[in-house]
Image: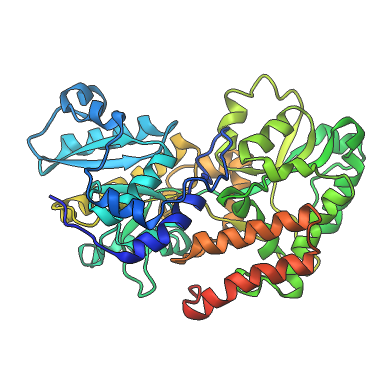
């Protein structure tokens, strides 16, 4: 059922993929992620794994019995069983409902969704790139897809999407993350999210500010006025951990300065490193942010230890759910403040689904992806999951993203959002960025030195394979 994908390049790239791809950006909820690089897979280990059968997680063994899943995904319809791997937790019920609807709509294939933890799923992809043991459909964090495409994990499905007029409705940013450098498509984006500033308005007003800061200068003023480091209270909290989450939260400051990844050692980029370094040096942001995942930073804000937080779309669900009683103050979301040159930026997160290489049912899998990503299904999915649609016409179907002032901030911010990559070497680029950010924040290097060191890694990569225009 699977063809063997024997690529020596997979062995060489594997360590970077496993080390940097484990932190969620948009699906981390209130969970902190480890930035450990202890899970490096050596070439010898890969070769050994290539000769051994893939060890499928226990979760899939339980789900292989289609009858036991009938209540969630529908009765077996006589179609070929198609495996779909994902790491959705809170959204798993929504995904099951979509699979059930499709399983009952046709009988060509029977979709069996399987939850696998994000860390384990990334490992299985990298191992599968060599062994050929892959599912039929796989979910992946959008910035990682280019790397997996280069490893041969995903199938080119361009020919199956030719003539599908709906493609014109997808936002270019999310859709571009499903493409290779030649523009071929390997999947479809499922959802988007981005970042904004969450403000404890009681703290801001007590310090004399009636509105969230609109510029970097105002932002620093608010940080200074609301900080009390002697009592562990700071003006701002964010995630600067040494993994993709840290890069995710750094990108709005980098691009907001007017810089890009390609100009990481320019004066604008240096100002973004200097901005965050200044926050820590002045006692306006805790040094502990280098150890915090996005969930940890949220916890600090919930505990009243930060006046402002760099927050993701998905965290609104936390505020409405588990933290509903804990948040007793007025709060407000605001767009990222503009830098001195007037530039604003935020960053796109989200997940994609692709057809995996070697599937005997590629055409049928594409039909399922098209069904899952119709305007109506995309709108309903993202409303239930608290995320942003990847299609412009999906936004128009509901007032969810405009009636709720909190979601409207994120939806409007999509106008100046930027993608991470897409690039086949994004894990290496990302690592250079978060290492430089941490070095500047901890005072190990000046902002100029940190930016220059990042450029030493990034620029040679981009000289060989530039970022998309």
Q: Is residue 81 above or below residue 374?
A: above
Residue located 50% across and 73% down the image: 467
- How many dots with numbers? 0
Residue located 26% across and 64% down the image: 156
Task: Provide residue 444's location: percent of width, then percent of height.
Answer: 78, 57
Task: Provide residue 211's location: percent of width, then percent of height.
Answer: 82, 44
Q: Is residue 425 above or below residue 82?
A: below
**Residue farthest along the top direction in this orientation:** 325
Q: Is residue 46 above or below residue 267?
A: above
Frontmost residue, 83 versus 150:
150
Task: Provide residue 231's location: percent of width, then percent of height.
Answer: 89, 30
Can see residue 166? yes
Tell me how the rendering is colored. Answer: rainbow
382 horizontally vs 6: left or right: right
Residue 362 occupies which quadrant of the picture?
bottom left
Residue 319 occupies which quadrant of the picture?
top right
Task: Provide residue 76's location: percent of width, then percent of height.
Answer: 12, 30
Frontmost residue, 52 versus 450:
52
Can see residue 228? no
**Residue farthest along the front direction in this orientation:** 44
**Residue farthest along the left direction in this orientation:** 78
450 horizontally vs 1: left or right: right
**Residue farthest along the bottom direction in this orientation:** 463
322 horizontally vs 59: left or right: right
């Amino acid at each position: 059922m699977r063809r063997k994908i024997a690529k020596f390049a997979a062995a060489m790239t594997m360590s970077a993929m496993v080390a940097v791809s484990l932190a969620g950006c948009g699906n981390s909820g209130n969970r902190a992620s480890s930035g450990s690089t202890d899970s490096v897979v050596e070439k010898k280990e890969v070769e050994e794994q290539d000769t051994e059968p893939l060890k499928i997680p226990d979760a899939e063994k339980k789900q292989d019995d289609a009858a036991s899943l009938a209540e969630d995904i529908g009765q077996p319809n006589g179609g070929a069983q198609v495996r779909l791997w994902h790491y959705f937790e809170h959204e798993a019920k929504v995904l099951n409902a979509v699979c059930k609807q499709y399983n009952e709509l046709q009988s060509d294939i029977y979709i069996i969704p399987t939850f696998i933890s994000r860390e384990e799923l990334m490992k299985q992809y990298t191992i599968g790139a060599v062994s050929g043991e892959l599912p039929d459909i796989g979910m992946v964090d959008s910035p990682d897809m280019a790397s997996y495409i280069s490893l041969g994990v995903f199938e080119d499905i361009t020919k199956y999407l030719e003539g599908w007029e709906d493609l014109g409705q997808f936002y270019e940013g999310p859709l571009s993350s499903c493409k290779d450098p030649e523009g071929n498509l390997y999947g479809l984006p499922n959802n988007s999210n981005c970042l904004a500033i969450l403000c404890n308005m009681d703290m801001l007003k007590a310090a004399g500010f009636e509105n969230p800061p609109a510029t970097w200068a105002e932002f620093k003023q608010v940080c200074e006025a609301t900080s009390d480091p002697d009592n562990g209270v700071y003006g701002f909290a964010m995630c600067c951990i040494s993994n993709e989450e840290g890069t995710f939260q750094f990108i709005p400051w980098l691009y907001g300065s007017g810089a890009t990844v390609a100009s990481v050692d320019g004066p604008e980029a240096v100002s973004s490193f200097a901005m965050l370094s200044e926050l820590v040096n002045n006692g306006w942001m805790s040094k502990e942010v280098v150890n915090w995942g996005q969930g940890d930073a949220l916890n600090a804000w919930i505990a009243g230890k930060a006046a402002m937080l760099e927050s993701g779309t998905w965290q609104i669900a936390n505020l409405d759910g588990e933290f509903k009683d804990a948040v007793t103050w007025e709060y407000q979301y605001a767009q990222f403040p503009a830098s001195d040159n007037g530039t604003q930026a935020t960053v796109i997160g989200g997940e994609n689904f692709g057809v995996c290489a070697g599937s005997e049912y590629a055409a049928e899998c594409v039909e399922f992806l098209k069904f899952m990503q119709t305007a109506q299904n995309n709108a309903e999915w993202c409303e239930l999951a608290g995320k942003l649609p990847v299609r412009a016409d999906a936004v128009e179907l509901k007032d969810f993203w405009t009636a709720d002032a909190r979601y409207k901030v994120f939806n409007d911010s999509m106008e100046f959002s930027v993608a991470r990559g897409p690039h086949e070497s994004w894990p290496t680029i990302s690592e250079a960025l978060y290492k430089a950010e941490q070095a500047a924040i901890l005072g190990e290097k000046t902002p100029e030195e940190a930016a220059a060191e990042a450029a030493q890694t990034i620029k040679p990569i981009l000289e060989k394979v530039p970022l998309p225009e």
